[in-house]
Amino acid sequence: MENILEINLPEGIIEDFSPVQIPLKYDRQLVFSDVHVPYYSKEALSIVLLYGLKNSANCIIINGDFLDFYKASRFNPDPRARGLKDEIIMAREILSKIRDLFPNAAIYFKEGNHDERWEHYLRDKAPELLDMEEFRLDVILHLSKMNIQYVRDKKILQAGKLNYVHGHEFGKGFTAPVNPARGFYTKGKQTMVGGHHHQTLS
């Protein structure tokens, strides 16, 4: 049988979906998701950040849907709603404040389904801009300038054996009828932290 290394095949295109590993030294993690800027509660986010400060968080995980991108939605958005420009400016301002509050923390910005609306909008309305770096969401939000790591492509974040997902990674209809927590475990077969579902559990 011919040696597999001797078969002259062209290289295939293989996407890397391996998890993003959070270094173990970041052992005091503050995790929140579904802020949906600009439709967010200033009081609620302030409480979260104050909790992180009081507990000396050294890692901030923004676990998806930090922005709402309502005007980039495919669901017939109301033209009177706040525009994309204002939403992006507000998001930058809040992210900059988070960096100021936690100057030495590792910060991860995980993409959620609402954050993905930006690229989907470009695909539908202006596909010619997709290959221009200036129009990538992480660039528009100035994440690298704030030393914030961008996690996209539905990649999972891992801290040791704990997995962080937003929730949209599993697709529609995965949630068990009991509650989202059970759905996460049934689908993932591992302990994980997720958001996306906007409901409290009893």
Image (cartoon, grey):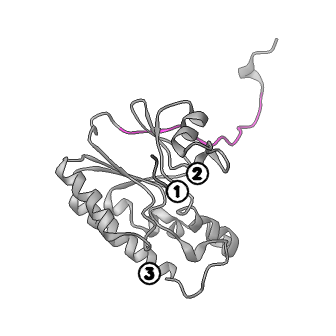
**Percent of width and height locating residue 2:** 80, 15
Q: Quadrant of the N terminus?
A: top right
Asked whether residue 1 appears in the rendered view, the answer is yes
Q: Residues within 10 Å of mark 2 (few under 14, many from 20)?
A: some
**Percent of width and height locating residue 144:** 37, 59
Q: How far apart are marks 2 and 3 (CA)?
A: 26 Å
Q: In front here: 9 or 17?
A: 17
Residue 196 falls left or right of residue 48: right
Which type of secondary structure does the marked residue at label 1 adopt?
Answer: loop
Which residue, given by chain and number where applicable, does mark 3 sit on?
86
* Residue 147 magenta: no
Please tell me whether mark 2 or mark 3 is closer to you in this view: 2
**Percent of width and height locating residue 88:** 44, 74
Which residue, given by chain and number where applicable, does mark 2 sit on?
168
> Residue 126: which quarter of the image?
bottom right
* Residue range highlighted in magenta: 8-22
**Percent of width and height locating residue 92:** 37, 70
* Residue 15 magenta: yes
Secondary structure mainly formed by the magenta segment: loop
Q: In front here: 172 or 22?
A: 172
Which residue, given by chain and number where applicable, does mark 1 sit on?
112
Residue beneath the point at 19% across and 47% down: 56
User: Residue reaching furthest right?
Assistant: 1
Q: Distance between the residues labelled 1 and 2?
A: 7 Å
Residue beneath the point at 75% across and 21% down: 6
The amino acid marked with disc number 1 is Gly
Count the marks: how many? Answer: 3
The amino acid marked with disc number 2 is His
